[in-house]
Amino acid sequence: MTKNTKVNAAILIIGNEILSGRTQDTNTSTLATWLNSLGVKVNEARVIPDIEKTIADTLNVLRKENNYVFTTGGIGPTHDDITAQSVSKAFGLKYEIHKEAFEILKSYYKPGEFNEGRQKMVWMPKDAMLILNPTSGAPGFSVENVFCLPGVPSILKSMLGGLKNRIVGGEPILSQTLSLKTVESEIASSLKKVQNQNQEVEIGSYPFFHAGKLGVSIVIRSENQSKIDECSSQILKFVREKKIEVVER
Amino acid sequence: MTKNTKVNAAILIIGNEILSGRTQDTNTSTLATWLNSLGVKVNEARVIPDIEKTIADTLNVLRKENNYVFTTGGIGPTHDDITAQSVSKAFGLKYEIHKEAFEILKSYYKPGEFNEGRQKMVWMPKDAMLILNPTSGAPGFSVENVFCLPGVPSILKSMLGGLKNRIVGGEPILSQTLSLKTVESEIASSLKKVQNQNQEVEIGSYPFFHAGKLGVSIVIRSENQSKIDECSSQILKFVREKKIEVVER
């Protein structure tokens, strides 16, 4: 079977705390790196507030435009955790107690500790599939192509391993980085020519200021290694002609 | 003049490097914090790739739904910097040399250094207003309610000071944080009651694990300090009843 080379996803970060600037989101970067390694290209990411209609409406756009949607946040025990009810609304599914999740959390907590707040975390869209949580018990869940993960970065990370087998990616997206001791304007026109001659690779140019070093990282991305190699050798050709130093980063 | 209490904005992060996971975005948090301090509520943030049609189409949605839109990224000298041409397309404006920007960069660089790559940075939508750049010369620009800033975080930050007077915010959004030595599930039902009795404040609950301390931060947000105070005293009432310790963070 040939893998589909175009598998894509959207990331939906749910939480007022990101939009107020209080919390620095790191889940987009974690999910994007992980998805790219599975051959899933991230088309877009959005951050939206804890408003049921906004969550449901946004999900209904993203889940139709993408092979996968990953949400983070809003699956805890408090009143502002409304992802599960919003996903139910988006799919027109009943929002109800998930029996398997109930059993998991009942045995996770000590007798008497599985209180009302914690029981809220087992309310999910009907027939949701669980995503197990090896860190803190409360599972995430998926409905069709929508996967709902928690907002706490360390917990989210710990849940990706168990999810890997449920994501069917395309060809892995390969990349090569060339870091150069130069400034972007010195290489802009040569780089543009190389991009024009190599339409099937994506060439990105990123200035860096790191540990006293100033330079430009050229990132070449494609599913095809030989196309990356060809593009890379064309770049190195003009780099040598311009006597630009290639540096370690 | 009474300030409009509902001034809102969207943040649009432009760049493949964020969606590949290569770069951790921090501009959303910087802009969100700054906008909140000016009384501008951030409705949503999006990360999109360096594709002209995607940028133009997304801008045309966001600029109609929000008082302001702030973009970051894509205004440098290389082929993958296509924000200015995409904004021109979104507004149906000519993409042309901006005379004032040309003069600024011409005098910024030494004679002979204002090369083709650098000259690309003075191509903008017709009649764009400049946003001065005290760090590295090349200005950002605005068209109507859309403000285009660079992607490099330190340069972006240095440009916000000069932009402040061009943003008319509403009432500042005030907040108070109570950090508690507890877990969310212990306070979830009491907190929900307080939220239900105080519909005009927004109460967020965020677990934290920091420097060996584990707890929950309750964030109360409103334009009205007395409503925050009332809400806060109701929360502190149940906190005392439950013998939960209030901690420093």
Image (cartoon, coloured by chain):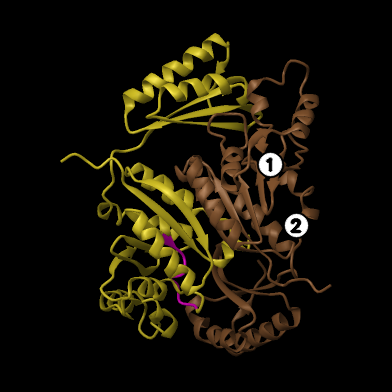
Chain colours: A brown, B yellow
Is A181 in front, or is B130?
B130
Location of residue B232 with respect to A59 vertically, above or below: above
Q: Earlier in the sequence, mark 1 or mark 2?
A: 1
Residue at x 68%, y 20% (from the top left corner)? A115
Please state, as top left, top right, bottom left or bottom right, where the C terminus of chain A lies in the image.
bottom right
Please report, as a chain letter, where disc 1 is located: A
Q: Amino acid at mark 2?
A: Ile
Q: Quadrant of residue B131?
A: bottom left
Going by the picture, which residue comes out furthest to the left? B1
Give the Cα separation between the discs numbered 1 and 2: 20 Å
Magenta stretch contains residue B75? yes
Residue A124 painted magenta? no
Q: Which mark is residue A154?
A: 1
Q: What is the crowding at mark 2: few (fewer than 14 residues within 10 Å), some, or many (at least 20)? A: some
Nearest the camera: B43 or A86?
A: A86
Q: Callout 1: 10 Å neighbours few (<14), some, many (20+)?
A: few
Which residue is label 2 attached to?
Answer: A167
Residue B62 on image: x %, y %: 40, 59
Between circles 1 and 2, the one closer to the viewer is 2
Which secondary structure is most common in the magenta stretch?
A: loop
Q: Position of residue A139 (x, y in %)?
A: 72, 37
Q: What secondary structure is marked by label 1?
A: helix
Residue at 31% from the left image edge and 38% from the top image edge: B172
Highlighted range, magenta = B71-78
